[in-house]
């Protein structure tokens, strides 16, 4: 088993395709099933080309790192004119943007939003060197920044990197006649969140459909891991049979667990509204990934079935992000102490015990809450400084208006 630290190092350097491929296979597919492992062990020890491995288990081309189609499930089609307008926006920035996507109701239709009132369009810019990027951008677009610009790029970068979830937002910026909000994040921090779920601030946002405008191979690989881990969490919290809508609502809701904005300030029906209007996009992102889970069967008519045998589910548990896995383990240890339950020393038995616990869903929900709550709160508090009181007040007012309208 390749250590996670080695995986992160190789993804970070992105030096060799073969190294990335083997690590991707280990992280995503080595937990496929006990039967697959047994079948593999029966093969002779002679090394075979990697495509044979994927062909043997019929993995989809979009899930094979060497395939030209790898990660294309992340590409969502939208109106060509809208796409070009979005690309034109990022092309106005002189500072180098390595990876970018647009998201939210300004890009994808959501139920409950008034089409006559065009929402602000949200962007994320992944950059290599945040300090250098802000230095260049302040020279070109000082009016995008609030009072924080007075302190220069050093303080701006410090606020971005050290407070909240590692993102610096500039809201209510007009570019080419379009009102936008853009967040700046370092590629390193973005990939770390996608792989480790440190904050789930952007990793959770990318569980939902986004429109990639400028791609990066390293982010695409990390996000494929992120999307697969979201599927695992959803499957562990769902029964043996469920609908596609239920699956995608579980996935779309991951990033909102622990987010105080869901209590007040966000539409309480937000998750259902996102999935209902974007179901084809969710299918595009997840269907091929889901088909590569050997314990899952698509029944047709939007129904899905999974084998809930503890052996299968314990393998999925082991492949959760390191951060969430540790929190689930702590929650189970607490449960065991309270209920006088002896914890097995053998890891396989421990995992099966966790899977069989009646509080498994609570373990996962509490773990997600602990990951999300503090970064979400401090990121919002940071917005008062980075956006300024006037913009923050306007943004909060619009959110409360939507929330109040949805509560009626």
Image (tube, rainbow, N blue to C red):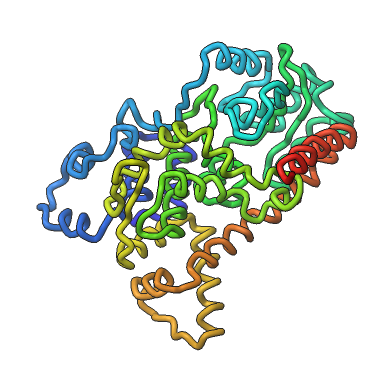
Farthest bottom residue?
A: 340
Observer-nearest of 348 and 303: 303
Tell me where residue 103 appears, x and y as whole percent: 60, 30
Quarter of the figure with residue 169:
top right
Tell me where residue 340 appears, x and y as whole percent: 50, 88
The tally of labels here is: 0
Is the N terminus in the top left, top right, bottom left or bottom right quadrant? bottom left
Q: Is residue 338 left or right of residue 122?
A: left
Q: Residue at x 67, y 20 (%)?
A: 95
Classify 370 as above or below 135.
Answer: below
Q: Is residue 30 left or right of residue 161?
A: left
Is the C terminus in the top left, top right, bottom left or bottom right quadrant? top right
Can residue 389 be seen here? yes
Classify 68 as above or below 353.
Answer: above
Quarter of the figure with residue 273:
top right
Q: Is residue 390 left or right of residue 153?
A: right
Classify 339 as above or below 323.
Answer: below
Can residue 127 be seen here? no
Tell me where residue 42 appears, x and y as whole percent: 11, 57
Observer-nearest of 395 and 42: 395
Q: Residue at x 36, y 71 (%)?
A: 352
Tell me where residue 59 appears, x and y as whole percent: 26, 40
Q: Residue at x 56, y 84 (%)?
A: 338
């Amino acid at each position: 088993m390749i250590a996670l630290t080695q995986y992160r190092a190789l993804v970070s350097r992105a030096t060799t395709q073969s190294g990335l491929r083997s690590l991707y296979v280990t992280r995503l597919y080595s937990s496929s099933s006990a039967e697959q492992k047994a079948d593999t062990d029966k093969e002779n020890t002679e090394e075979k080309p990697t495509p044979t491995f994927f062909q043997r288990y019929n993995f989809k081309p979009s899930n094979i790192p060497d395939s030209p189609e790898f990660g294309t499930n992340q590409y969502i089609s939208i109106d060509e004119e809208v796409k070009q307008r979005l690309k034109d926006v990022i092309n106005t920035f002189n500072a180098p943007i390595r990876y970018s996507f647009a998201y939210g109701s300004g890009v994808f239709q959501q139920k409950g939003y008034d089409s006559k009132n065009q929402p602000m369009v949200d962007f994320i810019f992944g950059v290599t060197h945040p300090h250098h990027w802000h230095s260049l951008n302040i020279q070109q677009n000082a009016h995008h920044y609030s009072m924080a610009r007075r302190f220069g790029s050093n303080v701006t970068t410090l606020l971005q990197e050290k407070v909240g979830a590692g993102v610096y937002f500039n809201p209510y910026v007009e570019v080419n006649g379009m009102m936008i909000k853009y967040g700046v994040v370092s590629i390193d921090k973005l990939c770390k969140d996608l792989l480790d779920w440190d904050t789930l601030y952007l990793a959770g946002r990318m569980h939902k459909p986004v429109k990639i405008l400028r791609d990066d191979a390293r982010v695409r690989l990390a996000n494929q891991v992120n999307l697969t881990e979201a599927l695992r969490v959803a499957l562990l919290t769902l029964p043996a049979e469920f609908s596609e809508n239920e699956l995608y609502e579980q996935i779309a809701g991951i990033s909102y667990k622990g987010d105080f904005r869901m209590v007040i300030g966000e539409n309480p029906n937000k998750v259902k509204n996102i999935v209902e209007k974007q179901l084809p996009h969710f299918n595009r992102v997840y269907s091929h990934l889901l088909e590569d889970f050997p314990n899952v069967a698509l029944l047709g008519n939007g129904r899905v079935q999974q084998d809930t045998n503890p052996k299968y589910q314990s393998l999925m548990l082991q492949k959760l992000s390191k951060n969430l896995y540790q929190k689930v383990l702590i929650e189970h240890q607490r449960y065991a102490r309270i209920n006088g339950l002896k914890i097995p020393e053998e890891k396989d038995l421990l995992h099966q015990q966790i899977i069989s616990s009646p509080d498994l869903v609570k373990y996962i929900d509490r773990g997600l809450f602990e990951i999300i709550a503090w970064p979400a709160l401090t990121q919002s508090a940071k917005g008062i400084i980075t956006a300024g009181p006037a913009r923050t007040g306007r943004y909060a007012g619009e959110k409360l208006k939507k929330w109040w309208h949805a509560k009626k």
